[in-house]
């Protein structure tokens, strides 16, 4: 139950990322780099402060999985932030959250998990909710809007890879795993940003610095620690269902902060999404507790 709560909190934190991406007027690559760097430094301080140690034997054993996961994490951020810049928060979040469907579809083949009828029905219910919300997203479907949705779908592919690969990482706790992946992401993103657009820190001033610090500490550090620590105790299909908390959070924040209007269709969609989570996870947990 603790792992489930960690994962839910990480989804709520990630749901606010779109707002920050809208307000930080620098490239998606730089946002991803700063997010990784600040998050890694924050977690390094926590790691040293709590006097934790990492088993380098475990790191060596998981080296390939850690590298692949870090590449997926870097690609996920770059394309997700670009999606938020090109289209609305709702469109970006909804296209990005095709990922849980991919996780459910691939988990029987990659993770050898059985697809239960209940999980399949919950995913269908969640998809119906996303369909209702997406109807409101059909605003100004220009080339940029469609491009943004495309970026969101590419980010979904990277998120799926990140989720599945992390299920193969063994003998590393949530903090060490997060710190290593963020550190590797910095090593991947720094040369990428340097060679694709140069590196000009002068453009990162004032309010941007504050927003980047909050994004790095809260989303990069705390959010991903909760994400990796939480997914350790959950199967792939549970992760897929709980992941729908993220787009619902994005939707609510976009209404309250950005001022996007929330229609009756969106409300129905949000209820269906949250309902699928309750049916798929909370009710099942109560039944297991009664049986135990």
Image (tube, grey):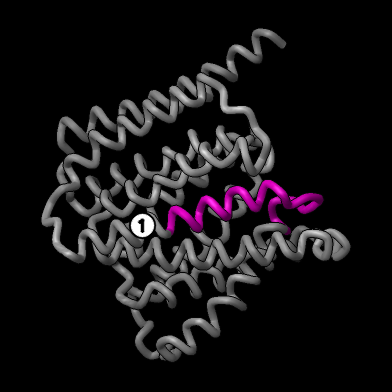
Residue 92 percent location from the top left of the image: 31, 54
Which residue is denoted by mark 1 in the rendering?
152
Point 40% across, 46% down: residue: 97
Residue 53 visible somewhere in the drawing: no
Counting other residues with Cα less than 10 Å from the Cα at mark 1, is it few (<14), some (14-19), or many (20 or more)?
Answer: many
Point 43% across, 75% down: residue: 29
Relative to 179, is 210 on the left or the right?
left
Q: Is residue 172 magenta?
A: yes
Residue 249, above or below 23: above
Residue 75 percent location from the top left of the image: 49, 66
Point 77% across, 59% down: residue: 62
Asked where in the image residue 17 lies, by quadrant, the reply is bottom left
Question: Where's the C terminus, which quadrant?
Answer: top right
Residue 208, above or below 51: below
Relative to 16, is 68 on the left or the right?
right
Query: Extreme front residue here?
Result: 109
The residues colored magenta run 155-176
State the residue in front, 147 or 44: 147
**Total numbered circles:** 1
State the residue in front, 238 or 203: 238
State the residue in front, 102 or 2: 102
Query: Extreme top residue here?
Result: 291
Question: Where's the N terminus, which quadrant?
Answer: top right
Point 15% across, 36% down: residue: 263
Q: Secondary structure at mark 1?
A: helix
Q: Is residue 270 magenta?
A: no
Most frequent secondary structure within the magenta stretch: helix
Query: Extreme left residue here?
Result: 140
Residue 31 percent location from the top left of the image: 43, 72
Relative to 155, is 135 on the left or the right?
left
Residue 244 visible somewhere in the drawing: yes
Residue 184 percent location from the top left of the image: 64, 71
């Amino acid at each position: 139950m603790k792992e489930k709560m960690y994962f839910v909190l990480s989804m709520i934190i990630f749901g606010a990322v779109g707002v920050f991406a809208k307000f930080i007027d620098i490239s998606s690559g730089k946002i991803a780099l700063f997010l990784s760097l600040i998050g890694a430094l924050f977690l390094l301080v926590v790691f040293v402060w709590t006097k934790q140690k990492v088993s380098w034997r475990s790191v060596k054993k998981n080296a390939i999985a850690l590298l692949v996961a870090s590449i997926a994490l870097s690609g996920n951020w770059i394309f997700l932030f670009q999606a938020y810049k090109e289209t609305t928060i709702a469109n970006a979040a909804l296209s990005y959250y095709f990922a849980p469907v991919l996780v459910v579809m691939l988990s029987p083949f990659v993770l050898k998990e059985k697809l239960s009828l209940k999980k399949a029905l919950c995913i269908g219910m969640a998809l119906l909710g996303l369909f209702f919300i997406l109807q409101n997203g059909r605003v100004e479907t220009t080339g940029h809007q469609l491009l943004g949705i495309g970026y969101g779908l590419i980010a979904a592919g990277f998120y799926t890879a990140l989720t599945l690969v992390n299920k193969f990482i063994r003998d590393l706790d949530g903090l060490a795993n997060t710190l290593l992946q963020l550190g590797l992401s910095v090593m991947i993103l720094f040369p990428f940003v340097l060679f694709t657009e140069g590196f000009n820190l002068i453009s990162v001033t004032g309010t941007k610095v504050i927003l980047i610090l909050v994004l790095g500490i809260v989303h990069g550090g705390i959010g991903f620690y909760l994400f990796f620590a939480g997914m350790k105790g959950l199967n792939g299909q549970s992760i897929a269902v709980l992941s729908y908390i993220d787009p619902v959070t994005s939707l609510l924040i976009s209404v309250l902060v950005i001022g996007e209007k929330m229609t009756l269709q969106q409300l129905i969609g949000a209820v269906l999404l949250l309902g699928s989570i309750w049916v798929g996870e909370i009710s099942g947990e109560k039944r297991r507790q009664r049986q135990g």
